[in-house]
Amino acid sequence: MASQVLIRNVCKTYDNFTALQDVSLDINAGEFVTLLGPSGSGKTTLLMVLAGFVRASSGSVKVNGSELLLKPPHKRGIGMVFQNYALFPHMTVTENVAYPLRLRKMNRLEAAEKVRHALSVVRLDDLGDRNIAHLSGGQRQRVALARAIVFEPDIMLMDEPLSALDKQLREHMQIEIRRLHDQLGMTTIYVTHDQTEALTMSDRIAIINKGQLAQFDTPDAIYERPASKFVADFIGETAFVPLTETHGQLTAFGQRFSTAVPVPDGAGRPWLALRPDRAILLDRPIDTLNCLPGVVRQRVYQGDSNLFYVDLPEGHEIMIRRGTGGAQGQDRKLEVGDHITVGVRAEDSVVVRD
């Protein structure tokens, strides 16, 4: 049975450094939640607090109503997959996977059956006798997963488990880990600094910056409706256009600017957060669109698309992505130095503040 995890006002300080500051999250039973943020943001510190390897300075973590922080690590019933896998090189695959069961003093017959099942789940049925040194990176990662699930934990913690894999294998294992999560019905809390990985795998993403929670929402909500300029900049490709706000009305370079959703409250300056694939290249302004004047400065060919760097007034720059095939590919060719109009629909005009 999966577990609900309620994190309340968790803080962690080291002398004069604050690693976590009042982080609160409600994680539903059976949910796949990713802690995402830049290096040093505090995401791994929070994971280690949950695992029991770091003691929180203050706060509470309750699992199904029971305080987790009062329990030692080995009594928390949590599976853990480390960044470097932390496998025992002198043991076989079977011995590595069985290790958590040995610690729990499970009888050999029951342990052997659980190990067999765990290896079957991660599709390593035939490698039980193999030495760890003779495995590929992907196989070692699967062994680490099998060891983490063998005692059937309600909660799985993963600390950047795919960072050592090449791009193709990493993308394959993203799907495999998500399949494993769905198959076993665990509550999974996953740490990564890879935005695409988080968007691919997660039910919800908690973005952490400088020890604080910046936004906690579904992948599409975070991508489409970022809560701040930091979130918009960190998730995906984004260009920022400065906006001027006067009596609730927005303008961009003196031109009226419309949005489909209310502008967020706050004291910081408003910015248009523009995704490269949401901009429309025009020969002239259109009344139904927000329009910005620009000059093509550079074109970068990327196979299935071209990325155009466009200079705007006052020294600002945006990126525009346009496909190289189909209807888009039949549009007139843009050349460096061309004067263009950049059109943005009101529904694609996402405004964020500093």
Image (cartoon, rainbow, N blue to C red):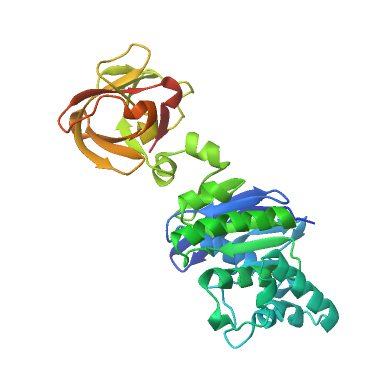
Q: Residue at x 29, y 38 (%)?
A: 307
Question: In the rendering, at what x and y percent does residue 87 appear?
Answer: 59, 79
Quadrant of the rendered image containing residue 81 = bottom right
Question: In the rendering, at what x and y percent does residue 274 appear?
Answer: 37, 33
- 213 relative to 287, above or below: below
Question: In the rendering, at what x and y percent does residue 227 appear?
Answer: 48, 37
Decide which of 61, 135 is in the foreground and name it. 135
> Which quarter of the image is occupied by the C terminus?
top left
Decide which of 51, 349 is in the foreground and name it. 349
Residue at far left of view? 337
Q: Residue at x 27, y 42 (%)?
A: 301
Quadrant of the rendered image containing residue 338 = top left
> Which quarter of the image is occupied by the N terminus?
bottom right
- Image-based side of 345 in relation to 169, left or right: left
- 315 relative to 169, above or below: above
Q: Residue at x 31, y 26 (%)?
A: 330
Question: In the rendering, at what x and y percent does residue 35 appear?
Answer: 54, 54
